[in-house]
Amino acid sequence: MESKIRQVKESFEADFQTALETGGFPEIRIKYLGKRRGLIPSLLEEFRALPAQDKPKVGRSLNLLKSHVQESLRKGEVRIRDFRKTGGSADLLDETLPGVTPELGSLHPITQVQELLEEIFLELGYTIEEGPEVETDFYNFEALNMPPDHPARDMQDTFYLPHGLVLRTHTSPVQIRTMLAHRPPLKIVAPGKAYRRDSDISHSPMFHQLEGLVVDEGIHFGDLKGTLEYLCKRVFHPKTRVRLRPSFFPFVEPGAEYDISCQMCEGRGCRSCRATGWMEMGGAGMVHPAVFRNVGYDPRRYTGFAFGLGIDRIAMLKFGINDIRSFFENDLRFLQQIPA
Amino acid sequence: MRFAYEWIREYAPVDCSPKELARRLTAAGLSVERIAKESGEHLLELDITTNRPDCMNLYGICREAAALSGTRLRRVRPRLRETGPPIATRARVEVREKDLCSRYSARVMLGVRIQPSPPWIRKRLLSMGIRPINLIVDVTNYVLLELGQPLHAFDLDLLEKHRIVVRRARQGETITTLDGVQRNLRSEDLVIADARRPVAIAGVIGGQDTEIRESTRNILLESAYFHPQSVRRTARRFGLHTEASHRFERGADREITRLALDRCCELLLAHGNGQVARGTLDIAARGGKTRSVTIRADRTSRLLGDRVSIPNITRALRSLGFRAGRTGTGKLTVAVPTFRSDIEEEVDLIEEVARFRGYDRIPSRLPLLPGRGVGRSVAANAIRHTRRTLRSLGYQEVLNLSMVDPDLEERFSGDPSDRVAITNPLSERASVLRRSLLPGLLENIAFNRNRGMENLKLFEVGRGFANPVGKKSLREENLLGIAVTGSALPEHWSRSTGPYSFFHLKGTLETLLKRLGFPEWEFRKGTSRTLEANHQAVLLVEGKIFGSLGRLRGDLTESVELDPGLPIFVAELHLDILKATNRQAGVCRAVPRHPAVRRDLSLIVDAGQQFGEIERLIRGIDGKRISRVELFDRFRPQGLSRDKMSLGIRVEFQQPDRTLLKEEVAGLEERILGKLNKELGITLRVAPESGHRAAG
């Protein structure tokens, strides 16, 4: 009898462990405690037939077994219920089940780069300015030393609007608006949208620029170089080199374009930089005296520099994106790869 | 433009490699984009900026290459034997508009034969993308590429009375140009005419009537200087952009007209068996003296941030073809060469000096002057907070183009009379400026759903544009658009995720309002035509409409080919209100030290009763001591009639300086219940729990 009790107990322990994983407690309950065929009731049946002198000892074992089974089953069933509700209790955790991920949105990559640039210039003491995206001919061209019929207007394929207005072709009009509103010293950046009538892998009819302008007495070309070098090192790698080449924009003189050492090959020459070792970043230069005259600054007293850069272009370089238009397609599978 | 290194070396015998020459030119502002190898030659592909028409030809590049390499430039010296009769016996030239044509030079050649050009000329033209035609046309093109002077050849015998008259077109005159198009001329157009009719549009394109043909034997060669703006206006009106107009618009060289003619005749004689008539017809307007500009050493040094002396300046400018004139103390006056139309004032010379010496040798400095000390404006900061708040609530930022499809736009924003249409759009589908961000967001939802993404929470910050009727200026405002579809939470095995609802959107906006520091706001029934009539609200702050929110109308959903039954919730806010409202973001108040008392009220109300009214009434009892009113339950219990509802409302009482007494709370509670019953007929469902409970 004692050995039978031990066998039932052992078999129960095994079944119990299995049930902890499978949740098969109703079946075990019937197998061990079922009124008609249950293993424990049938042991009790046998117990009744025992000689009286054996009963006290066996009875104790039997009672212990019965209460052990009942208690275990109760606990096990509770565990299973908890498990179903919460995904596991302490000793039942399946740590491989998927976690509850909090939902996290992200900013558009262009916004991320724009904010990065803003931070850099805020650290340097610049003020962030904004201006309208719909501009008059005066702010977008004329005040920037591009009178009507100036061939430089060809460089900027313009979207025209009614009443002689245009969608601004660059963020440079903000220079004019700021200079008309404030006296030097000025130290501003103006990020924002600009528009040109162009669409291909590296041009979008809408794109993002950041314009910089610093005006005071004694500002020189070396200041411009130093600023661009600092900027490019901060945006890209600290070892990034910057090159300025003479170029032409009617509102600066001397004018320049600036390049950074290729971020792919570190300047050795590769396909990304067409073997030149350099990547174009934007235009820059010393503010043209004609621009100062247009806003009523004395060009004999004040000098200044201005620069522009393509926010989308920096985003393309930083994130390794080939087609500028993919920024405005808004495919979430694309946008969510750049979370911040 | 592409120029062969080998060709450059004919005039500028530089001793460096093609790659090194490319580097030098690039460093001086003549950007070499690429070096291509073609039939044994190295073609330098240059990107010439619009201010340097003098470098849009081989000789100009050679001039720069020689200056940058310290090499002597070989001059162009055509050798010509004039064996024909005096030119005056064969042709006459008259210039009536000297303002628009300050120089007109012409030569005549007799007895030419029309034949193909020699292979070397054809090869050079082809390498620069010009199709060879016949010797005469090819040589004029060749000289254009070599010296930058546009030339035109007329069939002399087809010029009425062998005359050239440079004049304005007469009203009603027409010309059929070389491209076969008949064009109506206007009086502002400058034309080259013969005794009877226009035979060319000056500086733009020749006419068909007098073009060189198989039968041509005698030719008149034109080499002139036309006014840049006049050429530009006419060319643009006709939608023409030719090799000639490109150069005249940017400014040609008045002093090169005769040299170019001689070079052209020299080449034709060498290959064409003709005779050159003796002399050149050359009509020049008075004036046009060379310009003098003075440059100062100290100004140069201060603008560049590098010490530059007069000898440095002299050397640089001389090398680049400027004639040094008077020198004063620290000053130098130079004569600007006629081919440098871009040099007008001192800074232009400073740039010349800087680019000759190289921008890379100017030392760098990071300027540390103070700015205005404003940083980011209040409004810009608020917009930044808006973006960040929505991001942290799980929304994804998108950016759409400002130009949109007119049909879709009109469905959202209605009557297009205040809409801004682009005069020259890239495509019809992007031809108007958006007044709302919602059309773009709806398209984003359609795009992403079609790619298997069903739960979308999108937002955009951008501008909306309108042209108020009767006004000549446009209105531009900052907008926030939100569009959501799918489930409220990401799916997970441990829970069921309900669908996103109006109240999720409202809650999002409330969180945003709180973050932006608005002390209060109000939601009212909305009347937006883009939203489902009974499923929308309008948001007000300080009595002004901040925006609207609700469920997008099904037919709008259908317009982007989505199931009209798909619930899409949208909101649009006018962010410029942030500039003009009183907000208190980031103001800290002391946390009350004394515990609040919380009571839960179970109320029976009319089914149509608005919660907002109940809340207002409760708060109105004692705005100071009633610190919170919250709805925690809303249902219809079994057995309650259909026109009633049960609301569970939690009210929190608090006094900053002490703990409220039991009796005080009971008194307030009584007044609340009394007022609710009197004003709105609200009754208590069950007796409230008795006793105080400290708030958690």
Image (cartoon, coloured by chain):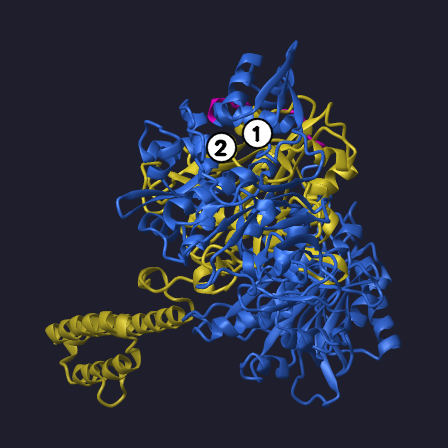
Chain colours: A yellow, B blue
Which of the 4 image quarters holds residue B310?
top right
Residue in the image at 69% along x and 26% along y: A216
Please state which amino acid type lies under the numbered disc 1: Leu
Question: Nearest the camera: B361 or B95?
Answer: B95
Q: Which mark is residue A244?
A: 2
Mark 2 residue element: strand
Q: Position of residue B252 (x, y in %)?
A: 58, 41
Going by the picture, which residue comes out furthest to the right?
Answer: B678
Q: Label 1: few (<14), some or many (≥20) within 10 Å?
A: many
Q: Is A272 or A263 nearer to us in this picture?
A: A272
For the residue pair B153 and B681, the one nearer the viewer reads as B153
Please state the horizontal and vertical placement of residue B196, each as a whole percent of the image: 68, 62
Q: Amino acid at mark 2?
A: Leu
Q: Considering only vertical position in the picture, is B686 above or below B327?
A: below
Residue B126 seen in the current view: yes
Q: Check the picture and name the quadrant holding the C terminus of chain B.
A: bottom right
- Apparent side of residue A19 relative to residue A141 in the rendered image (left or right): left
Which residues lie in the magenta part? Answer: B360-372
Q: Residue at x 59, y 62 (%)?
A: B401
Q: Which residue corresponds to the image point at 29% horizontal and 78% vertical from the top-left?
A: A25
Structural distance between the alpha carbons of marks 1 and 2: 10 Å
* B500 versus A156 height, above or below: below
**Mark 1 and mark 2 on one chain:** yes
In this figure, which residue is indicated by the disc labeled 1? A224
Side (left or right) of A128 relative to B49: right
Q: Is residue B668 left or right of residue B339?
A: right
Of residue A284 and residue B522, the one placed in the foreground of this image is A284
Decide if residue B461 is in sight here: no
